[in-house]
Image (cartoon, helix red, strand yellow):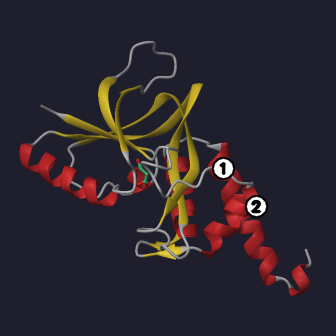
């Protein structure tokens, strides 16, 4: 049986596993939020970074990319890869995936999605909401084995532009990180 995986974060720009098709599209009733703490990729246990997760948001949509994995051997490789990479995401959901905003019927059903839930008992790295400035400062300072947290944010911003989608939360955060970095470079923080 063919397997589909939906990516809404780093999986958009870097699948990292063999696949035979990629579709740009969206899932319904979720929004992308920088509420997940990362101690294994974009931060450390001493200074966690922030990565995206999905939050329930009836009526909203979240754009990303779905990958099809057909061969049995590729499925094994993909699952092995994802179970390590997404190990701080405590939930797997199987959702409808749409490619056409006017369609009532999904293009695909049962697409696997990794989610980091807000349940601190199941997901001890969950950080939750904070002001845009606080999140931006955390992202500026954090780095982990996969690289600086700010690169994750900027890659995501670029990947979303490349698939033709604007995400206000991601764009506002990227703008705030750039603003703070520029301010830091100016003497006495003068604008
Ligand atoms: C995803 O991309 O679907 C999950 C979040 C991440 O790994 O950045």
Secondary element at image label 1: loop
Numbered badge on residue 129: 1
Residue drawn at the location 62% of the way across and 51% of the way down: 170
Which residue, given by chain and number where applicable, does mark 2 sit on?
133
**Eyeballing the image, is 96 above or below 183?**
above
Question: Is the C-beta of the residue carrying label 1 under 8 Å from the nearest atom of ligand 1?
Answer: no
**Eyeballing the image, is 50 above or below 168?**
below
The quarter of the picture where the N terminus appears is top left
Q: Nearer the viewer, residue 121 or 25?
A: 121
Residue 63: x %, y % from top left: 50, 37
Alpha carbon separation for disc pair 1 and 2: 11 Å
Residue drawn at the location 66% of the way across and 59% of the way down: 174
Residue 121: x %, y % from top left: 46, 49
Number of the front mark, 1 or 2: 1
Q: Quadrant of residue 84?
A: bottom left
- Furthest residue in direction bottom, as rendered: 187
Label 1 CA crowd tier, 10 Å (few <14, some 14–19, many 20+): few
Q: Quadrant of residue 68?
A: top left
In this rendering, position of residue 176 left or right of residue 76: right
Q: Quadrant of residue 127?
A: bottom right
Q: Are marks 1 and 2 in contact (CB under 8 Å)?
A: no
Residue drawn at the location 67% of the way across and 44% of the way down: 168
In this rendering, position of residue 23 left or right of residue 139: left
In this rendering, position of residue 97 left or right of residue 37: left
Residue drawn at the location 68% of the way across and 56% of the way down: 173
């Amino acid at each position: 049986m063919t397997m589909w995986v939906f990516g809404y974060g780093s999986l958009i720009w870097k699948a990292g596993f063999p696949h035979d098709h990629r579709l740009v599209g969206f899932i319904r009733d979720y929004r992308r939020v920088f509420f997940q703490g990362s101690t294994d990729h974009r931060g450390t246990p001493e200074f966690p970074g922030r990565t995206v997760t999905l939050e329930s948001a009836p009526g909203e949509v979240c754009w990303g990319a779905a990958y099809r994995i057909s061969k049995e051997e590729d499925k094994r490789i993909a699952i092995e890869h994802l179970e390590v990479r997404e190990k701080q995401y405590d939930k797997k959901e199987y959702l409808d995936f749409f490619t056409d905003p006017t369609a009532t019927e999904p293009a695909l059903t049962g697409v696997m999605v990794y989610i980091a839930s807000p349940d601190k008992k199941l997901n001890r790295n969950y950080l939750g909401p904070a002001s845009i400035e606080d999140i931006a400062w955390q992202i500026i300072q954090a780095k982990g084995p996969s690289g600086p947290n700010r690169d994750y944010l900027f890659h995501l911003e670029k990947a979303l532009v490349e698939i033709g989608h604007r995400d206000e939360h991601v764009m506002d955060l990227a703008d705030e990180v750039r603003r703070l970095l520029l301010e830091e470079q100016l003497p006495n923080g003068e604008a």
